Image (cartoon, rainbow, N blue to C red):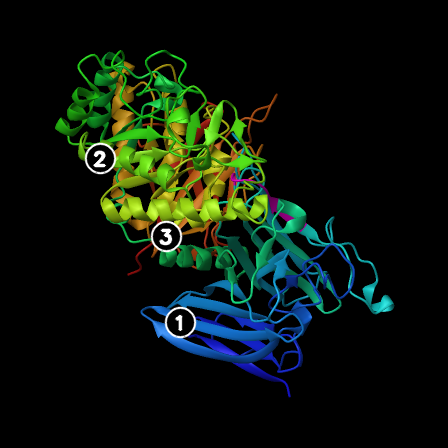
Amino acid sequence: MNSSVVWGHPHLRVVLDVSPDGPVGVRSVTCGGPEAAEPRSRAAQPLVELLLPGEGRARASHRFSRTAAGERLAYRGCDQCREGRWHVLRLDLHDAVSGLDAEVFFRSADGVAAFQVWTRVTNRGEEPVLLLGVTSFAAAFAGSVESADVVRAASEWLGESRWTREPLRAHAVPDLGLAAHGQDGRGRLAVVSTGTWSTGGSLPTGGLIDRDGGRAWLWQIEHNGAWRWEVGERLGGPYVALLGPTDVDHQWHRRLAPGESFTTVPVSVAVSDDGLEGAAAALTGHRRAIVRPHPDRERLPVVFNDYMNTLMGDPTTDKLRPLIEAAAGAGAEVFCVDAGWYDDDGTWWDSVGEWQPSQSRFPRGIEEVLGHIRALGMVPGLWLEPEVIGVRSPMADKLPPEAFLQRGGVRLTEHGRHHLDLRHPRAVAHLDQVVDRLVEELGVGYFKLDYNIDPGAGTDLDADSPGDGLLACNRAHLAWLDGVLARHPGLILENCASGAMRMDYALLSRLHLQSTSDQQDFRRYPPIAVAAPMSVLPEQSASWAYPQPDMTAEELAFALCTGMLGRLYLSGHLDGMSAGQLASVRAAVAGHRAIRHELARATPVWPLGLPGWDDPWLALGLRAGDTTHLGVWRRAPAGSAPAESVRLELPQLRGGPVDIDVRYPRHLPAWDHRWEPGTGVLTLTVRGGEPLSARIFDIRRAATS
């Protein structure tokens, strides 16, 4: 007999079809309250898909949908409870043929239309079972394929977070006339990331939006390694499957002996009836619920880093002192000495690993530099790339071979570096000693944790498969970070991996800010900064603002605006600037500091839609209560002048007059503006001036008498 399980809270309602003789499936996910209409009697897509070599799929395809074992997982019961602010659901499923149990865990925070979910598979049989893939979550999406848009993002070094939104029918899921054939399709749109750069090619954030009804799902896979998400069409409509590593994509398989368990990576899904921006707001609220508490999340200090377009990995005492003084004068609260502080011979790339301060760069010791930072009221920071050991580093021979990732007994080498295996106690002990020494002896309060290689599929040492070894190493890395923060609860940790090649919420639930790119061209950076809040909390999105003495006043303001609606991350030769230029930098820092705590409760909107890489106009709004903080950037397309005017849609302010104030820069010519209260459209016009310019506005409803 079929029945249902209803779970949630006033902001989220999940209904699951359950049966003792068939698979559990998600019938509906809504933003709380009763269902608007009677759903179909049976959910088509099983909640859990299990791919086993002796079972395969119930029908041949390239999908993680309709696996043979997944279709047999029958309902055996559930538990619902509260854990603080979290509402928790645990479902028990069982496959009598394979002897596998599947427990599915949901949790959702009060007030948030989103949930986190993962699956634990246990072998209750008498023989080993080989897993080739297990979904963390799979479900049918309400609505038709014809009205569904898919949103996804490509990403690479210097070109992160390039979002597209297009009809699902456009390319990925053509109309094949499935109803006439009476069968599900076999294709799918699969988005896959391999290795340890979890966001090096595509983002683990994606979504489906019903253009007609406004219903939207956004999801994120919270893993610092390999993953896959896919969408496709079944006879009943679109489906979604979210996974960590798999055999077909990542050389992953896991053998479960009787009694052994495997737990998938967690994923999160946000839902809304208000389209993309509604789902983005829900996912933003959910991210704030899953991040680890830390004092930095309250203080949100402004960081100056000496690297980007400034010292570029060549710090010395003489170069740093004037920069430190200029940064403090501009209002920075953390000063990070980036790459090179450990280098004595000028070729540090393949010699890193001991992390001892250079004597030639700092003749009186790096303590002098760090002390000067503290004396000027800033927290001293250092760059660190903990997971690698250079091939010329003494540590390459001091640590045993088993402390490194291996394939076929050979240590993996990539770009002159070996990769530590943090499952090994000697590797962990080495890194713990490094961090504890730098914190306790040198007083470092901030680390920029970088990561500039990708070792590939993984390690086959002490693992069923390379992908299985890599997954264990990914999890050991997270455990090491947890240990660092437990020992040093006030330490601030930045997440960086050649910019944003590892921008995932396995890491960002622990670490405090995210470098959004290594892009050195300030003209190309705005689309990256504007897109970042789709994947990262505004208060964690650290986009470089690197003004330079040779910039015009408009160019300098343009560069600074790029960092202001996030975690302001300064660089640039401030020590070589004129008094007027320094005043502009100080005004930007002060303007950001005045609103940073509002940004930490704001939700993103995109008045021009998600940014295109070459768009001449770009806009990001952050809604904080009654105020929308709006950033607008104007760029010249190649070979032509940019349009003078742009129309921005701000429907949240529709219906009355608004007050529009320029937050920054106030010292440059104002842009004309015209507000249409009936449509909620703001038109901005630039009269003459330079083709490259940007402004940060505060917009709020006008008081009425």
Kind of residue sitting beneath label 3: Ala
Q: Secondary structure at mark 1?
A: strand
Location of residue 555 with respect to 478 vertically, above or below = above
Q: Residue at x 45, y 26 (%)?
A: 522
Please name the residue that numbered disc 3 is placed on: 602
Q: Which residue position holds label 1?
A: 87
Q: Is residue 129 or residue 670 the one in the foreground?
A: 129
The type of residue carrying mark 1 is His
- Mark 2 or mark 1, earlier in chain: 1
Mark 3 and mark 1 lie on one chain; the one further toward the N terminus is 1
Residue at 55% of width from left, 78% of height from top? 35
Q: Tags 2 and 3 in contact by the CB under 8 Å rule?
A: no
| Region rendered in magenta | 190-197
Bin the neighbour count of mark 2 within 10 Å (Cα to Cα): few under 14, some 14-19, many 20 and up: some
Furthest toward the left, the residue is 375
Marks 2, 3: nearer the viewer = 2
The label nearer to you, 3 versus 1, is 1
Reply yes or no: does residue 324 show up in magenta. no
- Taking the spot 57% from the left edge, 64% from the top edge, the residue there is 215
The answer to whether 302 appears left or right of 125 in the picture is left
Please give left or right for residue 96 compared with residue 606 in the image: right
Residue 381 vertical placement versus 252 (above, below): above
Number of labels in the image equals 3
Residue 43, image x and y in percent?
65, 74
Q: CA distance from mark 2 to mark 3?
A: 33 Å
Judged from this view, the residue extending furthest toward the bottom is 1
Say whether residue 164 is visible.
no
- CA gap, disc 2 to disc 1? 38 Å
| Quadrant showing the N terminus | bottom right
Q: Which residue is mark 2?
A: 439
